[in-house]
């Protein structure tokens, strides 16, 4: 396959950070931010102070060229090494995943379909992954993904973070904003500098201030069953709702109402049938 990959190495020892962009082809903030970082390293404008950084700016090149989320299946649901890859995305995963397996840390850059503030996914809540999440400059940290998918194993073979956690590699996935929003490019760029700074690979004066982040927990996943499943309003990501509030309506007329006060997470107006439609969760009080 030969997915585009860039290697930068310092003469001083340090961590090996792997950064992924464009796991989903219609998400351009990762590719844009990583192009900028790559050209800074290549031109000598930026020096890698320690360790090694491996960058895959566009992990799904055919989907990127087509401006679609994926070609055959969601790369971030089949991200592992496949003995006999049966789809384009499984071929990509089989090429890229071994780089993650031998890294010291993983940063995976995404954007979302809905409007909303940037946030980071903390998958397995280890101190090392939490530290990486807090270094990326977003106000929100979302937990609970593995628990939600434990109830829906048919939807998730392996995502980038679950794969990294298998190898005990600290990891973070940043959702930088809405697809195509230029602000998301800046969030992505800042997140990469935050990760590089955490491992002393760039001067920390350039990195966002580390922050604790407000922690949210995702608890439920709703799958789209019909093209006519609909939302009663345009939900923003992390928009709050009250117990009893109407969240969504099935094509059958069945109403999905909130069982408790909470927040809407990653509502998608365009998800495929049988795929993730929206999640719900709540704020974790610290
Ligand atoms: Zn994505």
Image (cartoon, rainbow, N blue to C red):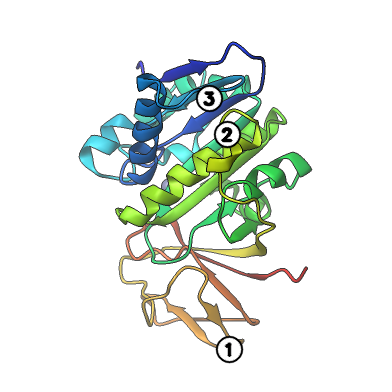
Mark sitting earlier along the chain (3/2)? 3
Residue 2 placement (x, y as % from top left): 36, 16
Residue found at x 36% / y 45%: 29
Label at residue 97: 3
Residue found at x 53% / y 87%: 245
206 or 279, which lies in front?
206
Residue 65 placement (x, y as % from top left): 22, 35
**Is 233 located above or below residue 102 in the figure?**
below
Check contact, mark 3 vs mark 2: CB within 8 A.
Answer: no
According to the picture, the residue beneath numbered tag 2 turns out to be: 203
180 or 168, which lies in front?
180
Question: In this view of the protein, can residue 158 be seen by the observer?
Answer: no
Quadrant location of the C terminus?
bottom right
Q: Estimate how packed mark 1 is, as few (under 14), some (14 to 19) or many (20 or more) residues with alpha carbons within 10 Å.
A: few
According to the picture, the residue beneath numbered tag 1 turns out to be: 244
281 or 35, which lies in front?
35
Mark sitting earlier along the chain (3/1)? 3
Residue labelled 2 has its Cβ within 8 Å of some atom of ligand 1 = no
Could you tell whether 64 is left or right of 241 in the image?
left
Q: Say which quarter of the image contains residue 22.
A: top left
Residue furthest top as drawn: 11
**Is 110 located above or below residue 3 in the figure?**
below
Q: Is mark 3 on a helix, strand or loop?
A: helix
């Amino acid at each position: 396959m030969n997915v585009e990959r860039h290697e930068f190495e310092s003469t001083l020892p340090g961590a090996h950070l792997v950064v992924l962009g464009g796991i989903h082809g219609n998400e351009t903030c990762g590719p844009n931010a990583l192009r900028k970082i790559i050209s800074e390293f290549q031109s000598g404008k930026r020096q890698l102070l320690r360790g090694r950084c491996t960058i895959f700016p566009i992990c799904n090149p055919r989907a990127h060229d087509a401006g679609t989320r994926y070609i055959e299946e969601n790369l971030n649901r089949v991200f592992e090494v496949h003995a006999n890859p049966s789809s384009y995305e499984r071929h990509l995963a089989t090429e890229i995943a071994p780089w993650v397996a031998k890294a010291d840390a993983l940063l995976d850059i995404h954007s979302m379909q809905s409007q909303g503030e940037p946030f980071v996914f903390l998958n397995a809540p280890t101190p090392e992954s939490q530290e990486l999440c807090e270094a990326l400059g977003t106000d929100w940290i979302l937990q609970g993904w593995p628990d939600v998918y434990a109830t829906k194993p048919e939807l998730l073979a392996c995502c980038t973070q679950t794969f990294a956690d298998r190898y005990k590699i600290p990891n973070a996935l940043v959702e930088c904003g809405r697809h195509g929003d230029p602000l998301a490019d800046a969030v992505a760029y800042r997140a990469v500098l935050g990760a590089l700074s955490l491992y002393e690979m760039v001067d920390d004066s350039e990195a966002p201030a580390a922050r604790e982040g407000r922690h949210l927990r995702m608890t439920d996943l709703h799958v789209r069953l019909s093209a006519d499943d609909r939302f009663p309003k345009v939900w923003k990501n992390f928009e709050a709702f009250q117990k009893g509030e109407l969240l969504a309506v099935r094509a059958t007329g069945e109403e999905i109402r909130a069982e408790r006060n909470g927040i809407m997470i990653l509502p998608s107006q365009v998800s495929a049938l049988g795929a993730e439609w929206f999640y719900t969760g709540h704020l974790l009080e610290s």
